[in-house]
Image (cartoon, helix red, strand yellow):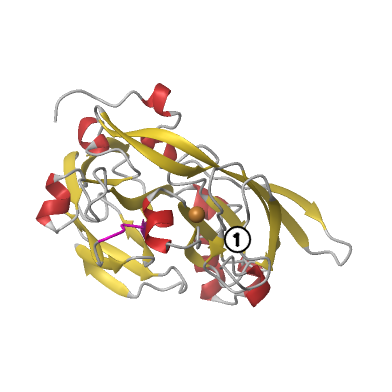
Amino acid sequence: MAGTVDVQRLGFDPMEMLSEWDYGATSRLPDGRRLREYWITAADQEIEVAPGVVFNAWTYNGRAPGPSLRCIEGEMIQVHFTNGASHAHTIHFHGFHGPDMDGIPGVGRGVIEPGDSFTYEFEARPYGCHLYHCHAIPLKRHIAKGLYGVFVIDPDPARHGGPQRELAARRNHREPACQAINEMVMVMNSFDTDFDGENEVYAANTVAFYYMQYPIPVRRDQVQRLYLVNMTEFDPVNSIHTHGFFFNYYDHGTTLEPTLRMVDTVMQCQGQRGILEFSFADAGLPPGRYMFHAHQSEFAELGWMGFFEVI
Ligand SMILES: [Cu+2]
């Protein structure tokens, strides 16, 4: 690959995307519970997914993936959705909610036409690493165009007792135990730039090879936590493989204890996601460049490959 993608022109920076959270706006409901509100607008947008390769995307809030939404278990959530794009869209959240809030055609409000708005409302449950995406038909096209994002529900330490409370605090963004951890978000995605139903470009956070060109700086003495979501279209499975270090893995993030310990490869089907945790100091590893990539070699060679620069 020659050249680089101009992130100023792109409108979002995959390096900043790693740690950018949309916490919404909070207020108190009459019953004492916390309300958390988000505002999301869909649009048609050109994005450069590799140097010189421009893709006609559909975006949420001007980026693909859309904003990484973050909230706490038990809060009331309102997502105010406006469709500023040229096709009908929805937002379908993974998590507990009634059928009317499912964001699918033919149930509840169904698809939201261009120019229309709708508010999705539900309680944030269960805690975990979730996602949202458009569910309009044809589904493949609406997902492949870029309408998806990460939706993390932190566990509420007050709802978990004993040692579970401590583990919940480590995962809750309001707690110092969590703030001491370096958190990152990666969405594994892909782009079919010639409309043949197969992908030409693969990436984590949209821009091919971005973290090869700009290795992600991480501190050796800090625990690392990676929220990983697979939104790759047209291929049934994607994966992450780490070089020289292993990690603990929490499938869907819906448990406080790892569901896999000490692995260097996990695969995810489309819509599957999980949390990786690792520490270079705890493993007694030296500073330097540690590679990560899809272990489907084709995806790696078409863009889904990067480095951590351990300092
Ligand atoms: Cu759509």
Q: How many marks?
A: 1
Is residue 232 covered in magenta? yes
Mark 1 C-beta to ligand 1 under 8 Å: yes
Coordinates of residue 204 in the picture (x, y in percent): 30, 47
Residue drawn at (46%, 44%) of the image: 58
Relative to 122, residue 84 above or below: above
Query: Are there few (<14), some (14-19), or many (20+) residues within 10 Å of tag 1?
Result: many
Residue drawn at (33%, 23%) of the image: 6
Q: Which quadrant of the figure contains the N terminus?
A: top left
Q: Specify the amino acid type for callout 1.
A: Val
Secondary structure found at label 1: loop
Q: Which residues are magenta?
A: 229-234
Instruction: Name the dominant secondary structure of the magenta segment.
Output: loop
Relative to 79, residue 302 above or below: above
Coordinates of residue 303 in the picture (x, y in percent): 20, 43
The quadrant holding residue 258 is bottom left
